[in-house]
Structures are given as C-alpha cells and as structure tokens.
C-alpha cells in the first residue's frame, strides 16, 4: 500500500510542479475587436468624428492583439489593423499596450507609413461579447471615435 501511496504522491508533485512552471510562462493576451459591421443597429461598428476630413461614411473599425504581462521578449507589443471606411483607409498597425489600472488597457498603435496613429482605450469593466466600449483618439487621421459594440478580451496573468 505504501508503494502505491508513494507513486501517487510523486505523480501529484510532478503535476503540481508542471502546472506551476506553465503558469509562470503564461502570457496575458489583450484583444480589442469591434464588429466590423458598418450598418445601423445593435451590431454597428464605431463612429469617428474627423477634425480635418468630412467623409460621408463615419464608421471605423479595428482588430488589435497585444501581449500583456509576459516573461517573453514580446511583452507589451501589439499587432493588428485599423480601418476608416469613409477614407478607404485600411492599415496594418503595430504598437504597445499599457494597463494604467486594473482591466483598463491603452493601446498606442500606428502604421509604418504614418497614415494611422491612434490611442485606443477600453472602458472597464470588461464584459463578455460585444458589450464593451473602446474610445479612440487619433492624430492620423485626426479625430476621435467611439465603438460601443466591441469585444475586449484579456486572458492569462494580469
């Protein structure tokens, strides 16, 4: 009986150590994604108020993924895309993310050619589904936007 107990104890110890090592190597992932639906109604995408342009279509969208808290060399980095329908502008963006307070994230992103430069901030608390608000402040294209039907997802260590 003691041999079985010893084997089970060793197995549990190995399992606990493996879980602990895995948790230490886990990374926090943050995603901002609006619905990409430029139609009216419950699932409409964000609207953007331009300071220098005045296109008829005021919808804008984004899908940005960031590496939050992490032990790897990509900590804080972001990749994704932003689009401004009225300008016919869709760009790959890169940047970084910070968490100034619990579950409040700020993504600062830009395109390599400078046609997009924005700061996106979610409004806590984070809710499941298309029930979050993300505000955007951009120097290129210049203006501010709000996306009330956005997925904000933060997973992993925080």
Image (cartoon, helix red, strand yellow):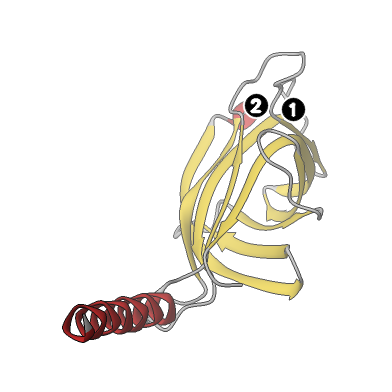
Residue 60 location in percent, x, y?
A: 66, 34
Q: Quadrant of residue 154?
A: bottom right
Give neighbour class at mark 1: few <14, some 14-19, many 20+ (Cα, 10 Å): some
Q: How many marks?
A: 2
Residue at point 66% right, 57% down? 118
Q: Quadrant of residue 26?
A: bottom left
Dot 2 and dot 1 residues touching (CB under 8 Å)? yes
Q: Quadrant of residue 103?
A: bottom right
Q: Relative to 93, is 56 on the left or the right?
A: right
Residue at point 38% right, 79% down? 25
Q: CA–CA distance between discs 2 and 1?
A: 6 Å
Quadrant where the image shows the N terminus:
bottom left
Q: Residue furthest front?
A: 1
Q: Residue furthest top?
A: 40
Q: Which numbered disc covers residue 86?
A: 2
Residue at point 26% right, 77% down? 8
Work out whether 89 lies above or below 156: above
Residue 20 location in percent, x, y?
A: 40, 81
Q: Nearer the viewer, residue 5 or 146?
A: 5
Element under disc 2 = helix
Q: Which numbered disc covers residue 131?
A: none
Element under disc 1 = loop
Residue 29 location in percent, x, y?
A: 50, 61
Quadrant where the image shows the C terminus:
bottom right
Q: Which numbered disc covers residue 58?
A: 1
Q: Nearer the viewer, residue 151 or 14?
A: 14
Q: Relative to 82, is 22 on the left or the right?
A: left
């Amino acid at each position: 009986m003691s041999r079985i107990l010893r084997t089970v104890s060793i197995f549990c110890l190995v399992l606990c150590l493996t879980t602990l090592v895995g948790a230490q190597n886990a990374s926090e992932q943050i995603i901002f994604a609006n619905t990409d639906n430029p139609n009216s109604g419950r699932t409409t995408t964000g609207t953007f108020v331009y300071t220098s342009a005045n296109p008829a279509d005021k919808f804008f969208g984004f899908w940005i993924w960031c590496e939050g808290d992490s032990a790897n060399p990509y900590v804080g980095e972001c990749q994704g895309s932003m689009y401004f329908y009225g300008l016919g502008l869709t760009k790959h963006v890169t940047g970084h993310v910070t968490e100034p307070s619990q579950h409040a994230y700020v993504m600062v992103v830009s395109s390599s050619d400078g046609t997009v430069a924005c700061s996106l901030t979610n409004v806590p608390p984070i809710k499941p589904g298309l029930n979050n608000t993300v505000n955007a402040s951009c120097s290129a294209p210049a203006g501010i936007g709000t996306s009330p039907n956005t997925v904000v997802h933060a997973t992993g260590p925080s």
